[in-house]
Amino acid sequence: MDHYGNSVYLIENLCKGCTNCINRCPTQAIRVRNNKAVITPGRCVDCGECIRICPHHAKKAKRDFIDATDKYKYTVALPAPSLCAQFNNLEDINILLSAIKSIGFDDVFEVSAAAEIVSEESRKYIASHKEQWPLISTACPTVVRLVQVRFPNLCDNLLPLITPAELAGELARKQAVEKTGLKPEEIGIFFLSPCASKVTSVKNPIGMEKSNIDEVLAIKDIYPILLAELPKFVEQPEDLSRSGKIGLSWGITGGEVGGLLSDACVAADGIENVIHVLEDLEDDKFSQNLEFIELNACNGGCVGGVMNVENPFAAKAKMQHLRKYLPVAAARSDKYGEYNVNWTSEVEYQPVFELADNLKESMEKMNRIEELTKELPGLDCGCCGAPTCKAHAEDIVKGIARKQDCIHVLREYIHKLSEDIAELSEGI
Amino acid sequence: MADLMELNYVVSNEDFTRAGEASSDVKKKLKQLGVSPEAIRKVAIALYEGEINMIIHAYGGKIKVTISEDAITLILADKGPGIADVEKAMQAGYSTAPDKVRSLGFGAGMGLPNMKKNSDRMDIQTELGVGTTVTMVINL
Ligand SMILES: Nc1ncnc2c1ncn2[C@@H]1O[C@H](COP(=O)(O)OP(=O)(O)O)[C@@H](O)[C@H]1O
Ligand code: SF4
Ligand code: SF4
Ligand SMILES: [Mg+2]
């Protein structure tokens, strides 16, 4: 992990330098240098878009693996709600939870159960903090990172509550300590994650000093193992599920808002839509009475996460089927004793796009960028390794690229050179 | 103090969906310049309202943004119908917007008051049948 703790990274030998990813990145974090894609630390928000688009599968997400269970005396798995939507004909969540236990965990604690408590706490927080309306959902770490690097004026609107996965980790460890008498650090809390973004948020926590989760596994890595185990539990699954419709629905867009039981809320999903909403929010374009905005970086919500297996829309259908017979909510806060859901550390603006640390110098640089942009062909072809001519101009001014990295500029330069040579040789 | 940077935009009234392009570009640049979030917020709101007014009430126009070390100046000039009674136009809730515009959610009569609220100095020069120039200064 680098200083910024991104989990999306490049596998160099697979990268062909094709530039497919550079245009897709919502924060223009990628450049192709020496035929390899390079991610600028600090700018990457771990949205996974480059993983989705790379035709050579050269982008991957760092994560932990199931053999990490050996490091602990007692382990608890925290399945994300979206995991339940990955399987065909799953009629009962207990079948899945039993199968999870059987692949090497001592216990399971559904993130959806914790999500119901977060819904409850969110309702209270929103009702008592009108001055922060509309509050912005903080369940998707990519959204929080995006706000931190691009929307300084919206940092105060972030809902300062930990994610359902973090609360699940907290409650699961507490229960395990009570049950086993072991020390907290002897217990391994494993989050079964739909995305890279959640891996990052465990290594580099948001609103807290240290994560409550020890290891993050990818749903797609454990999927095949689970698939083999599921049939064994179809007949007599253990009664393990503690969540209802509200909790499970957090896995799809609109689910978090559904748990708020209020009409003055909206939900948007997909990174482009999220950015659009944040832009408009920054300009005060939403109604003053809007209480809450749910934002998920992935299409369809977490079922669209890049470490899932199933197509997000098929997953959504499965989720809807599965939740049909569930109670509205099953997990209530009073069943879990003491816990903390509030952020304990500040989430501040990170000005990674600033050109210099004082206005005068920044303006000089920006003026040069504007001039240089005019001298570039305006094709945004990506051949220079930057997503746009403008971005290339920025890189030149920052001293990390040369004007001639643009092949059109280079061609003109060579053309001029050959004319000069021709002229010279005529003189001989 | 000499102006250190100047940005120019042409606002067209042909395409409503493009309203806000200038304010969004200015916002992006101010972030890169490291201008304080508070000032960016004021500029974004004031400029967006002004841009919308040019589109709804005039026939588009030109925006000039100058940035110096101590202030951002926004000059919005149009060759529209002009404002008959500026004092009235400045009142919260006053609007002459046609129903068609109101049905799109604009025309609440809060534009000019919001522009005033978000700038440290605002001046309106207007002449009926000639046009309107709104100048706003946001101190840094
Ligand atoms: N650029 C302009 N040209 C002509 N009239 C304008 C212009 N800007 C504002 N006005 C007039 O001032 C009134 C109030 O403007 P504003 O407070 O923005 O409210 P709204 O745009 O909702 O009507 C408008 O209804 C319009 O009559
Ligand atoms: S994960 Fe997203 S933000 Fe990070 S480099 Fe890839 S596309 Fe850009
Ligand atoms: S929407 Fe969900 S799955 Fe996608 S990045 Fe955000 S938290 Fe991860
Ligand atoms: Mg207006």
Image (tube, rainbow, N blue to C red):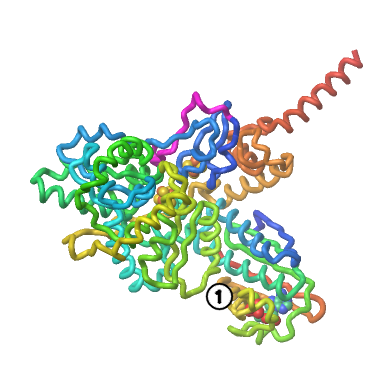
Q: Residue at x 68, y 33 (%)?
A: A406
- Which element is circle 1 on? helix
Q: Which residue is mark 1?
A: B117
Q: Residue at x 53, y 61 (%)?
A: A277
- Foreground of the two, A334 or A24: A334
Residue reaching furthest to the left: A181
Amino acid type assigned to the residue bearing label 1 in the image: Lys
Image quadrant in which the C terminus of chain A is located: top right
Instruction: In the rendered view, tell whether residue B8 sits above or below residue A65.
Output: below
In x, y percent, where is residue A223? 35, 39
Magenta-colored stretch includes residue A15: yes
In x, y percent, where is residue A91? 32, 52
Ligand 4: image quarter? bottom right
- Foreground of the two, A104 or B43: A104
Q: Residue at x 30, y 51 (%)?
A: A165
Mark 1 burial class by Cα count in 10 Å: few <14, some 14-19, many 20+? some
Q: How many marks?
A: 1
Q: Residue at x 33, y 65 (%)?
A: A122
**Chain letter of the residue beneath label 1 in the structure image:** B
Give left or right: position of A118 versus A427. left
- Foreground of the two, B140 or A353: A353
- Foreground of the two, A102 or A59: A102
The image quarter in which residue B2 lies = bottom right
Highlighted range, magenta: A2-17
In x, y percent, where is residue A209? 28, 49
Image quadrant in which the N terminus of chain A is located: top left
